[in-house]
Amino acid sequence: MIDFQLNPADFILLLPEIVLSIGAMLMLFLELFLKDKKTLHQWTAFATFLIAFILLLSQGSNTLMAFGKMVRADLFGQFSSAIVLIGGGLTVLLGKEYFVKRDWHRGEYYSLLLFASVGMLFMVRGLDLLVIFLGLELLSISLYILVGYFRERLFSNEAALKYLLLGAFASGFLLYGIAYIYGAYGTTNLYEIREIGSAESATFYWIGLSLILVGFSFKVALVPFHMWSPDVYQGAPTPVTGFMATTTKAAAFAAMMRILFYGFPAENMDWTPLFWFFSAATMTVGNIFAIQQLNLKRMLAYSSIAHAGYLMIGITVGSETSVAGMLYYLLGYLFMNIGAFAIVQHIEGKDETRLNVESYAGLAKRQPAISLAMTLFMFALAGFPLTVGFTGKFYIFAAAMNQGFIWLILIAVINSLISVYYYLRVVIYMYMKPVVEETEFSPMELPAKVALTVCVYAVLHLGILPGNFITLAEEAISALF
């Protein structure tokens, strides 16, 4: 067993988590004493994410362990944490415009976002299965509340209840899996498990890791554990939906990569057939059901399921190149998806009656800049060249082809072609359909404009000039292998 000794210097590695936690508690005090200063709430939360991001980058690329090897600061954790912090910052910028329209702008929204981000940082930087589990639970509890944030809306309450019940069920699988891994290795620490190598009980190993994968499959919405996703995404506040579809997915995938490629590297290839099935089934089911959706939030929910299938190709192949492509794609997916949800929340209106694709008919004539940005995000999600969606898919698909996964890539390419239909349907309605009804759109708030501009720039920059970020992703992945 690891000899745990508390070292005050260890807290330096946790400065991003500490800053986010202090910011989350500060938001509650601001809500209590400065209820009318809603702009202050938003910019304080954004400043908290920015400070945490700067502290994260200041830690450099050295690999360090803290708290008895329970937390590991390395380039992989830094890259994954950066995705979480960027996603949280962008979601904060979108919050005020959405909630002010509904007279429901509260400080606890930002507090819950910060607490959820703390949980995700522990998930991606934890080196012990129990630390990862605690991070996942902190994230989950925050999300249960955020999904049901509109407590006076029946549909929001229904979504929160579904997420709570199924999420608790998935957490039980995960915790039982950790218990079996402890039975197999006598420890839950991934560093020790890596050093031990072979499990004392192969049966406990197989059962334990299977249950852990079930728990994480629920979080990233892999088939057949995806059923909760469309209803929850539709019922949650739109900024929260974008947050869940990007940062939560990134943190869960990063934790899976840490467990599979760092903790159990020798046994990982035994799972290739199962991962192959997960990948193919998830992308196929996601795209087929997305075609049938006219509600934009449900369409993007099934789209998120399909993209989880594309991302699973990286884990299925299991090479450094494929997993690096997966990490790069998570970064790009963050910007193209949050950007799409930023436009959805702007168009849907206070009563959220403009969520169907028909509501976008003739939008290009009334909102040309918004329509152009939405077109870019739809093209990126479909994987068109010169966008990060194309670059990310190409990188993952090429790595899989080099390893001989020809049939899996054939399925992925067919699914990508299928997805073009429902993504381009939105563009066709915006540019080629006549206006059904004249609608007055309120001006987009400055913070939301900033978030949207950042997403547009990132989608193009990462797609046209991906070199530095791909190199960084490859260096980050080397910390796992």
Image (cartoon, rainbow, N blue to C red):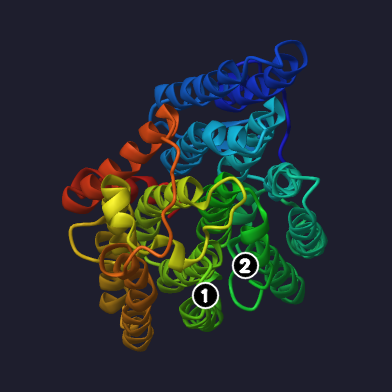
Q: Nearer the viewer, residue 281 or 270?
A: 281
Helix, strand or loop under label 1: loop
Taking the view exactly as shown, the residue that stands out farthest to the front is: 438
- Residue 481 lies in quadrant: bottom left
* Residue ID for mark 2: 230
Query: Residue 35: percent from the left, percent from the top?
Result: 71, 16
**Element type at mark 2:** helix
Residue 371 in percent (x, y) is at 30, 53
> Which residue is depicted at the point 37% across and 52% down?
336
**Are the residues at dot 1 and dot 2 in contact (C-beta closer than 8 Å)?**
yes
Task: Give, as a three-letter code, the residue at label 2.
Answer: Pro
Asked if residue 130 lies left or right of residue 351, the reply is right
Of 451 and 67, the residue lying toward us: 451
Kind of residue indicated by mark 1: Gln
Q: Is residue 479 above or below residue 413?
A: above
The residue where tag 1 is placed is 293
